[in-house]
Amino acid sequence: MYDGANWAKETIVKIEKKMKEVVKRSCHKIPYTTTDGIHDDWTEKNICWWTNGFWGGMMWQMYHLTGDESYRKAAIEVEEKLDANLLNHGGMDHDSGFKWLPTSGANYRITGSKEAYNRTLLAADNLAGRINLAGGFIRAWNDADDGSKAGWAIIDCMMNIPLLYWASEQTKDPRYEQIAKLHAKTVMENFIRQDGSVHHIVEFHPVTGEFITAHGGQGIEQGSSWTRGQAWAIYGFVLSNIHTKDAVYLETAGKVADYFMKNVRENGAVPVDFKQPESCPWEDSTAAAIAACGMLEMARLMGDEGKKYYDAALKLLHFLVENRCNWAKETDHIVEKCTAAYHDKEHEFSIIYGDYFLIEAMLKLTGQELFIW
Ligand code: GLY
C-alpha cells in the first residue's frame, strides 16, 4: 500500500500550482463545469443551484493552506452573491448545508466574521423548518406549491444536516440537533438496504408519514445503487457520528462503506451506478472522491479497525490522481469523468464538487484540511 501522507504531499504541490493559475481566471464566477477546459459562469444561470458552495469551499481550503489573499477574496465574493439565494424562499431547499457550510460556515470558522455567522445560522433555521414531523424526515426539494414533492427525502441530505449540528453547537439550542437526529434515524430505517446499499429517494406520505415507495433518482432505477448516493451516505453518517458521538452512525457508515468497497471496479474506478450493465463504461469520479473523504474519517475514528477504510480510500484516490486528474495549468478543472445522473444526456465531464472533494481528501491525508462539515 502507498504511504498516504507523503504521496498526498506531492499531489498537494500539483494542486497549489494549478489553483494559483485557475483562481486568476475564475474570479467573479461561481463555476459548475468547464467548456473546453475553462470554467463556465454558472451564477448567471441559477444562483440557487445546489453546487454553488463548492467553489467558495475550494477557495477557503486553499486560503487555509497558503494564506494567499486572492483565495479569500474569491470566497467572500461567492458568499455575498449567495445572499440572493438566502432571500429567495423558493430557492431555499434542503441543500443549505452544501451551500453555506463551505462558504459562510468556513469563513466563520477561519475569521469569526459576524456576517458569516448570521448567514450560516439563517440557512440552518430554514433547513430546520423543512422537517416533516409525521415522517421524521427533512423535505428535500420544492415543487410548484402543489405538494407533489412534499413527502420526498433524499440520501444527499445526510451531508446537509451537519449544518444543524453546527447550529446547536454554536447556539447551545438543542432543537437543531434534535431535528438532524430525527432525520438520520428515519434514513437508517428506510433508506439502508440489507446488503448495505442505499436508495436515492424515499417518498413518504406527507400527512401520515408512512413509507410510500423508493425511487431510483439519479441512478438507473428503483432498487439500483447510484454511487454518489452511496458516497453521500458513507460521509454523511460519519459526520453524524463526529457531531453526536453516537456509535450507531459509524456502524451505519461502515455497512455502506463495506458495500461500496465490494463493488468498486478492480482498478479503483467508480461507475455511475453499481448496478449498471458491464457493457456501460460511464464513471462518476465525484463518488470516488466523496467516498474517500468519508472512509478517511472512518479510519481516523476507528484506529486499527479502520485500516481497511484507509487503504480503500487510498486506492480510490490513487486511481483518481493518476488517471482522472488534469494537471495542465491551462485548464480550470482538475477531476475528469464526473457524472451528474445516469439518465442525463451527458456523462463524464468536469463538475466542481469533484474538485472540491479531491482537494479535501488530499488535505485530510496530510492533516492540513479546514474541517467545514
Ligand atoms: N445532491 C445532488 C447530487 O449529488 O447530484
Image (cartoon, grey):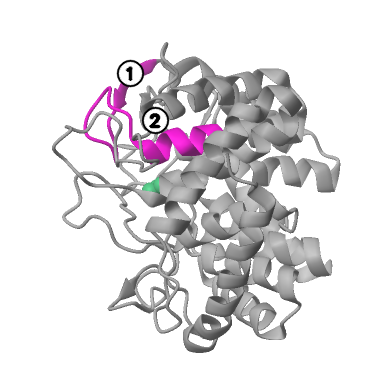
For residue 61, side relative to residue 81 (left or right): right
Q: In which quadrant is the N terminus drawn?
A: top right
When the figure is inspected, residue 137 is found, relative to residue 74, above or below; the finding is above
Does 227 lie within the magenta span?
yes
Q: Is residue 288 in view?
A: yes
Q: Is residue 129 in view?
A: no
Q: Compare marks 1 and 2 and give the one earlier in the sequence.
A: 2
Between 119 and 344, the residue placed more toward the observer is 344
Q: Are marks 1 and 2 in contact (CB under 8 Å)?
A: yes
For residue 190, side relative to residue 65 (left or right): left
Give amino acid for label 2: Gly
Region in magenta? 211-234
Q: Residue furthest bottom?
A: 24
Residue 151's label in the rendered image is 2
For residue 197, side relative to residue 158 (left or right): left
Residue 212's label in the rendered image is 1
Between 25 and 240, the residue placed more toward the observer is 25
Badge 1 crowding class, 10 Å Cα cut-off, few under 14, some 14 to 19, many 20 or more, is few
Does 84 lie within the magenta span?
no
For residue 121, side relative to residue 355 (left or right): right
Q: Residue at x 60, y 49 (%)?
A: 126
Label 2: state its secondary structure: loop
